[in-house]
């Protein structure tokens, strides 16, 4: 397995890989790999002739006062995981290789970035879209793998790929959870014991809404109220609870089959997100 840090070298390696092994897959990550990332990587290795995993904690998607400095990092064990999964190349550039002096080009997907996480994190999705587009042009994948855990990100990347004719297949992969239902996230490593116990009420809120949906409830107000009650038990600070159209991200008042409930909440200082399709 090669570990590449320079965009120019990665571009060269990607060109060679693509001519030898097609399709070429890419799994973009911010490292601190867990079973959620591993599920994406495994899917990519079964569907692609060669796979690149990128590890880059993108400074441009963190706002002032967010947890960029505290974001977990475990490069050595990440590389070991990738090696064991028979990844061809890990692309792990330093920030100044991705954003050289004078960097001045940004990608905005304003409608899809406006609500949910974008409302409280101005500039977040601009940073995400820009780095993902750069990763596509550097790693030249034919297939890219993203988690449904970051659902707004997934929908926004699909839009960007269509709008800019980037010509890659975007594959969305289901959320991997801990045994108690908590969605896996690199940020979970920063939860104190007591916070970890409270964090499970986020997925319980989603499950409670899903149970109501199965019982026939379609009023978003009622579904949100039920989720809210669960989250209150965990004494978490709710950022939003919404039910959205899974393609347009439009906020709904009446839920339908496969519409999604999305939640963001802070547990102590750690902001966590999760979502679930409502299925009857
Ligand atoms: P991150 O390193 O958090 O930026 O995540 C990298 C990729 O892994 C993104 O496409 C995420 O949506 C995906 N991912 C993160 N957590 C999970 C999870 N629990 N299940 C599935 N995919 C995930």
Image (cartoon, rainbow, N blue to C red):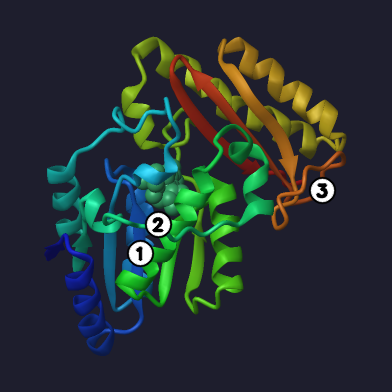
Q: Residue furthest front?
A: 102
Question: Badge 2: how crowded within 10 Å, few (<14), some, or many (20+)?
Answer: many
Q: Which residue has dot 3 on it? A: 256
- Residue 173, compared with residue 162, is above or below; it is above
Residue 194 locus on image (x, y percent): 40, 10
Task: Quickly name the residue at label 1.
Answer: 135
Q: Is residue 165 above or below residue 27?
A: below
Q: Nearer the viewer, residue 178 or 124?
A: 124
- Quick one: SS at disc 2? helix
Q: Sequence order check: which comes first, mark 3 or mark 2?
A: 2
Assign a secondary structure to mark 3.
loop
Residue at 31% x, 71% y: name it.
139
The answer to whether residue 59 is visible is: yes
Residue 36 in sight here: no
Where does residue 206 sit, x and y in percent of width and height?
64, 32
Mark 3–mark 2 Cα distance, whole angstroms, equals: 34 Å
Decide: marks 3, 1 in contact (CB < 8 A)?
no
The residues bearing labels 3 and 1 have C-alpha atoms spaced at a distance of: 35 Å
- Using residue 173 as the reference point, say whether residue 88 is left or right of it: left
Q: Is mark 3 within 8 Å of ligand 1?
A: no
Q: Nearer the viewer, residue 160 or 87?
A: 160
The residue under label 2 is 131
Q: Position of residue 84 (x, y in %)?
A: 16, 57
Who's the residue at 19% across and 66% down the image? 89
Q: CA distance from mark 1 to mark 2?
A: 6 Å
Asked if disc 1 and disc 2 are in contact, CB closer than 8 Å, the reply is yes
**Which of the 4 quarters of the picture holds residue 145?**
bottom left
> Which quadrant is the N terminus positioned in?
bottom left
């Amino acid at each position: 397995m090669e570990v590449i840090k320079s965009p120019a070298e990665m571009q060269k390696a990607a060109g060679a890989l693509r001519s030898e092994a097609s399709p070429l897959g890419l799994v973009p990550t911010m490292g601190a790999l867990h079973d959620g990332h591993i599920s994406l990587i495994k899917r990519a290795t079964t569907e692609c002739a060669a796979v690149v995993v990128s590890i880059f904690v993108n400074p441009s998607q963190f706002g002032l006062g967010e947890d960029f400095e505290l974001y977990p990092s475990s490069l050595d064990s990440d590389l070991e995981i990738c090696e064991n999964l028979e990844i061809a190349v890990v692309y792990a550039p330093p920030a100044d290789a991705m954003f050289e002096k004078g960097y001045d080009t940004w990608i905005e997907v304003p409608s899809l970035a406006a609500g949910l996480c974008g409302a409280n994190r101005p500039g977040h999705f601009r940073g995400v879209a820009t780095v993902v587009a750069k990763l596509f042009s550097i790693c030249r994948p034919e297939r890219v793998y993203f988690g449904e855990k970051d659902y707004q990100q997934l929908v926004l990347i699909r839009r960007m790929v269509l709008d800019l004719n980037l010509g890659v297949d975007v594959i969305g992969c289901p959320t991997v959870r801990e045994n108690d239902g908590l969605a896996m996230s690199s940020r979970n490593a920063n939860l104190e014991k007591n916070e970890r116990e409270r964090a499970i009420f986020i997925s319980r809120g989603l499950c409670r809404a899903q149970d109501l949906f199965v019982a026939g409830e379609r009023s978003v107000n009622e579904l949100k109220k039920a989720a809210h009650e669960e989250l209150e038990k965990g004494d978490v600070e709710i950022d939003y609870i919404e039910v959205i159209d899974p393609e347009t991200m439009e906020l709904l008042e009446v839920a339908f089959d496969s519409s999604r409930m999305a939640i963001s909440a802070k547990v102590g200082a750690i902001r966590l997100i999760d979502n679930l399709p409502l299925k009857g």
